[in-house]
Image: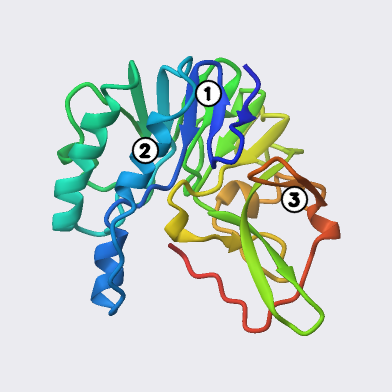
Amino acid sequence: MSPQPLPDLPALLIGDAVVISDLHIGMETKLKRKGFHIVSRTGDMISALMSCPEECRRLVILGDVKDTVPGRSRQEYLEIPAFFGKLMERYDRIDIVKGNHDTDLEEFVPFGIRIHQASGMVMGDTGLVHGHTWPSEEVMRCGTLVMAHEHPAVMFRDGVGRHMTEPCWVRGEIVSGGERYPEHPDRFVIVPAFNRLLGGSPVNVIDGKFLSPIINSGMTDLDSSEIYLLDGIFLGKRADLMVRERDTNRRRR
């Protein structure tokens, strides 16, 4: 059950389970308050998940189902139950690992959805977390750690300073359990955000900051991690892809 990306989707396949993260349903309300009137992307996310291979019978969401924190919006009250109501017709089981935006999530989801705490859950030899807090020791005993929260993207910059970003996968090694864990996974995977409206935060910017305590603890060999686009193209190791962006400032989400 080694995790494998689904082609052209920010989604992993683990056995018969589709694993996604960072839906941020309701973020259009926040953008509207800032003057940006954008049509809801929730329907697009439903369509993408409904069209996954038929053998996929389980859905796992690694946190940040909702966007508003603290509190909730009318859009979330309307769209989150409808989102899961539709997907429960397609999938036999749905699991959610809570993210930092998922306060009071239990108020929104229909009965039958399994909600796990932020310390994570285990599927076979794979541990799954959102990534904003420390995983449980049970999760860290797995061979592979899958996490989200970073909204990873790779930045491309040309000779005249123009740049663009693309969502990406990050795969690398965990080299230590630090002082916290007696055992640790051999490898990690960072999942890109499923909501395309989020864009991404470049992982290859010099002096760029990360959010996950696992990454910031020095437990991973981040420089040797491998960067892949959603279509499966291998770009190279992170250390070989570094660029400088003026006034880079990654803010905590």
Q: Could you tell me if the residues under marks 1 and 2 are in contact, i.e. CB atoms within 8 Å?
A: no
Measuring 47% from the left and 49% from the top, which residue is drawn there? 132
Q: Amino acid at mark 3?
A: Leu
Counting from the top left corner in percent of width and height, residue 231 is at 66, 43
Tell which tag, 3 or 2, sits nearer the viewer: 2
Circle 3 residues within 10 Å: few <14, some 14–19, many ≥20:
many
Assign the C terminus to one quadrant of the image. bottom left
Q: Tell me which corner region of the image, top left, top right, bottom left or bottom right, holds residue 187.
A: top right
Q: Which residue is mark 3?
A: 222
Residue 47's label in the rendered image is 2
- The x and y percentages for residue 60 are 42, 29
The amino acid type found where label 1 is placed reads Glu
Measure how far apart labels 1 and 2 are at the Cα level: 34 Å
Toward the viewer: 96 or 194?
Answer: 194
Q: Position of residue 16 (x, y in %)?
A: 50, 16
Say which residue appears at 67% left-offset and 83% top-offset.
246
Residue identifier under label 1: 138
The secondary structure type at the circle numbered 1 is helix
